[in-house]
Amino acid sequence: MSSPAASAGSLNPSQHQGQSSNNRFELLLFRLGEAADSDRRELFGINIFKVREIMTMPALTKMVSAPPHVLGVANIRGQIISVIDLPALTGCKPQKEDRILLVTEFARTTQGFAVEEVTEIVQVDWKHVLTAAGRGGQFVTSIARVDGDAENSRLAQVIDVERILHDVQPEHAKFDQPTGGRIALPPGVVMLAADDSVMACELIQKGMEALGVPCVMTHNGKEAWEQLQVLAAQAAREGKRAKDKVALLLTDLEMPELDGFNLTRLVKSNPQFSDIPVVIHSSLTGSASEIQAKSAGADAYITKFDIDELADKLREVLAKR
């Protein structure tokens, strides 16, 4: 993908399926313009599975009382979508007049992101993706070493699209008011959850509190795997099984160091943990990701963010334990 003009057109996620089977994924790289207080044009990235189409910016209709950072709406093949000004949101200044539109689909929504230019698609191993926590990036979930272990590898900031959507259009992420009853777990039993988005972690915690589910929150697959072993050791000291401490594992798919596909494989291939249900909770939509999750051994797949659907899925899975 050499230039925005060459990039325009539809993307078929099924062409890219399988990239997570070996802890790898495909990252679409783009630029937003000069960073604040700098003349550098940093690289940013988004999982290709979340991008439906790349095109030259179409005509936009300005909406009265639109949220800040929403440029307007566009008519894309008969669908009206909001277009978010990603450079303005991140404090970057585009140097090119002609913008590029990324039409994205994730978390049950379709929206557009205005960017300065698209550069390429690269394959990245999740072990070369590091969490951005504590590094000051409000809308960045992780940092990818694009060229792997190379000493001077380019760095790409992977944007936290869930956080952006929540902040710009918060009506898409109401997750703490379930309409059904609470979920009762035996005393001392918890749900283990993993998600690298700070905003998603907050939503999951609030949602589980509303459902009455004790939740141990971790921020990537590696941390979840380590926490699972800690809980298993506690269970062993009490003469119990890991299953008696952990009711189920709720995990995102896209996570630095160890993604949700391979975390699921680790759990299901280990006799100590294989009877613990795994529920995938991902913003990735489409059958390809769900098929891959099931092939990895997941017991269920649910798309973010709907607290009632998630609660129903948790009840269904827990009933089969």
Image (spheres, rainbow, N blue to C red):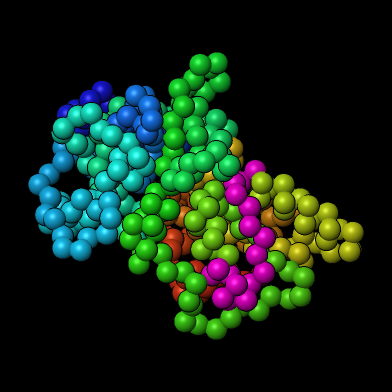
Residue 186, how many percent across, how many down? 73, 76
Q: Position of residue 26 (x, y in %)?
A: 41, 35
User: Residue placed farthest to the top in the image?
Assistant: 151
Q: Residue 276 sits in which quadrant? A: bottom right
How far from the left and from the top, in percent, is residue 104?
29, 48
Q: Residue at x 89, y 63 (%)?
A: 239
218 inside magenta stretch: yes
61 relative position to 12: left or right: left
Instruction: Please provide the residue range marked out in magenta.
Output: 206-222
| Quarter holding residue 165 | bottom left
Observer-nearest of 273 and 40? 40
Which residue is depicted at the point 77% across and 66% down?
244
Q: Relative to residue 91, is residue 295 drawn left or right?
A: right
Residue sitting at the far front? 37
Looking at the image, residue 235 sits to the left or right of residue 266; the answer is right
Camera sees residue 250: yes
Q: Is residue 85 above or below residue 153?
A: below
Q: Is residue 79 magenta?
A: no
Q: Is residue 298 left or right of residue 58?
A: right
For this rendering, which residue is in front, 145 or 246?
145
Rendered view: 107 above or below 97? below
Image quadrant where residue 43 sits: top left
